[in-house]
Image: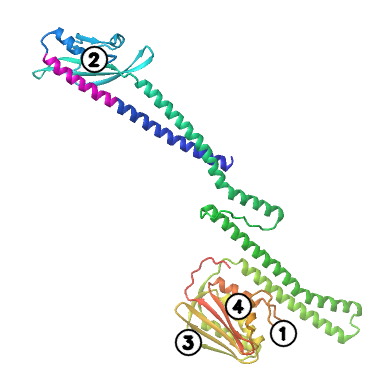
Amino acid sequence: MRITIKINLLTTTWMFCIMALVNFVVYFSFMKYTINTEEVAQYQKADDILKVISSLDSSSDANEKLKEFLTPHSYIRILKPNNKVIHEITNDSLLSKKIRGKYSETKQAQRHLISAEHGEEQVLIVRVPIKNRNQIIGSLETGERLVGLETSIELLRAILVICTLLAVVLSLFGGRLLANMIMRPISNMIKTMEEIENSGVPKTIPIQNKTKDELQIMARTFNRMIHRLQEIMEKQKQFVSDASHELKTPLTIIMNYADFLRRHGLENTEMADEAIKAIDSEATRMQKMTQTLLDVATLENESYLEMNELNLVSLCQSILKQIKHVYKREISLDYEEDPIIIRANELKIKQVIIILLDNAIKYSKDNIDVFIEKDERHAIIRVKDNGIGIPQGEIYNIFERFYRVDKARSRETGGSGLGLNIAKSIMKLHKGEIKIISREGTGTTIELFLPKKLKEVNHGI
């Protein structure tokens, strides 16, 4: 069943239930008020009759006086304790025949339904005791057709039924209108999704009305998701394009030298040795680049890091000892205090520091300085070199994949342009930040800001 039909049926059913409850209250309130009004009037008439009866001397006088209290379609009776009627006057013989007299020593009011000339009618009967010197000597009974009550009831019922039907019809119309209003943006979203499914091209939902409701929020959220998906797809295309471009050159070199060896063999020892070295060098570079690409893909899908307490000072000392031994470069370490403890993933932080030191070594010849300090919220690592620096216009692009300021020099040093992108992704996983301060020709300082307290929770890039 469609949602629009469900909404329509639900609103109509709810409206019908409300109207039924309202009709019930109105009907019984009307009946209660009308009957109570008639009962009060009848009791008042009975009291007036009792006053007259107490002052009468003979039966003839009683009949004459009682006639004054007769209203249309009514009767008045005086009964003895054995239900014997001693006085009765009426102007409605059918009514007096239908209702038998009944002696009562207490005040009471009753309603009867009788078959009259024009159908059934309500009759109100009131009985009150007749007292003489605090002794009950008889009972007064009055009865009166509630002329027009049944007509009023039928009219009320007709009005309530018509109002209920009108409310149901309006509810059906309103429910349909409401369902269409609710479903319009949802239908647009479904249509857009189907178009995306068929074409494979992400599209946004056109938003016409600027109502700040949940449907508007849902449409805007969908559009934000589509924009983000488009950005991801664009980055994916760029990544594939850049990766293909980066791998194309070493593959071309390997293929050319392999073709040379196939055609000339090993007859020219010098050329063969050059070809083998070139193939080995390019294959090694491809292997490193492939591993780097795998690191990038892994970081993109990383959602959880195991965090442990880590002393940044001892970690940096260990890394610098290894780097100095491999590259034979002078790297100084300066720190405010020892230890400086954070919660982090040791392997990932070590990878970031190595990336920064590797870049500093590649693009500078002088001493490299590493500083470790902290403030109220962060532990801070600064890697400073005195190398070629970065032009101001290039700093904003430095974290993009495969981006290199000096492509010729990067080719010589074997850089892939992915290191800083990986470093930034790792810092995001740690809820940290990476900043670059550089001036062309004077050197570069890269700062890492790591939160001192980081819970082991899921993190998204």
**Residue at 58% from the left image edge and 73% from the top image edge:** 426
Q: Residues within 10 Å of mark 3 (few under 14, many from 20)?
A: few
Q: CA distance from mark 4 to mark 1?
A: 23 Å
Q: Residues within 10 Å of mark 2 (few under 14, many from 20)?
A: some
Q: Position of residue 356 (x, y in %)?
A: 61, 82
Q: Residues within 10 Å of mark 4 (few under 14, many from 20)?
A: some
Q: Position of residue 81 (x, y in %)?
A: 17, 12
Residue range in magenta is 35-55
**Residue at 64% from the left image edge and 68% from the top image edge:** 298
Q: Marks 3 and 1: CB-CB under 8 Å? A: no
User: Mark 2 or mark 3: which is in front?
Assistant: 2
**Residue at 25% from the left image edge and 10% from the top image edge:** 90
| Residue type at tag 2 | Leu
The kind of secondary structure element at disc 3 is loop
The kind of secondary structure element at disc 1 is helix
Which residue matches tag 2? Answer: 70
| Camera sees residue 80 | no
| Camera sees residue 192 | yes
Residue 351: mark: 4
Of mark 3 and mark 1, the one earlier in the sequence is: 3
User: Mark 4 or mark 1: which is in front?
Assistant: 1
**Residue at 35% from the left image edge and 17% from the top image edge:** 121
The image quadrant that residue 224 belongs to is bottom right
Which residue matches tag 1? Answer: 409
| Residue type at tag 4 | Gln
Of mark 4 and mark 3, the one earlier in the sequence is: 3
Q: Position of residue 235 (x, y in %)?
A: 67, 67
User: Mark 1 or mark 2: which is in front?
Assistant: 2
Q: Marks 4 and 1: CB-CB under 8 Å? A: no
Per the image, is 225 magenta? no
